[in-house]
Amino acid sequence: MTSVNAALSMDLFGQVVAECVGGVQYNGTGGQEDFVMGANECPDGKSFIVFTSTAQIGGRRVSRIVARHPEGAVG
């Protein structure tokens, strides 16, 4: 099994946020964790998290790769 899931940002600890950027919520919860875990349980399973490296927020470009997610960021 191969799972491909989208994210909105990732920090240098490898933590993924899939619902908000810069404190603004863009998505609701989904089955991302289930697909990641399912691929992990399958022999030769692979899981990929994909996202663009920058986002346009309020007329300015911000990095989606951050040193650390802000407090309250929802994964």
Image (cartoon, rainbow, N blue to C red):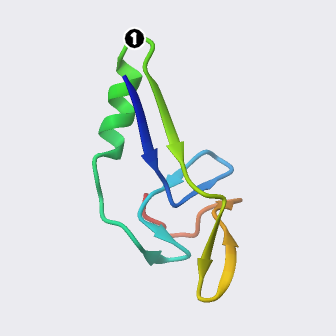
User: Along the line of sight, which residue is nearer the eye, 65 or 51?
Assistant: 51
User: Along the line of sight, which residue is nearer the eye, 42 or 50?
Assistant: 50
Q: Name the residue under label 1.
A: 43
Residue 6 x/y as whole percent: 46, 51
Q: Is residue 72 visible?
A: no
**Residue 32 as seen in the image, left or right of residue 75:** left
Q: Residue at x 68, y 73 (%)?
A: 62
User: Along the line of sight, which residue is nearer the eye, 54 or 38?
Assistant: 54
Q: In which quarter of the image is residue 54?
A: bottom right
Q: Can residue 23 be seen in this view?
A: yes
Q: Quadrant of the C terminus?
A: bottom left
Residue 8 x/y as whole percent: 51, 61
Residue 60 x/y as whole percent: 68, 84
Amino acid under disc 1:
Pro
Q: Quadrant of residue 52?
A: bottom right
Q: In which quarter of the image is the N terminus?
A: top left
Q: Residues within 10 Å of mark 1 (few under 14, many from 20)?
A: few
Q: Residue at x 35, y 45 (%)?
A: 32
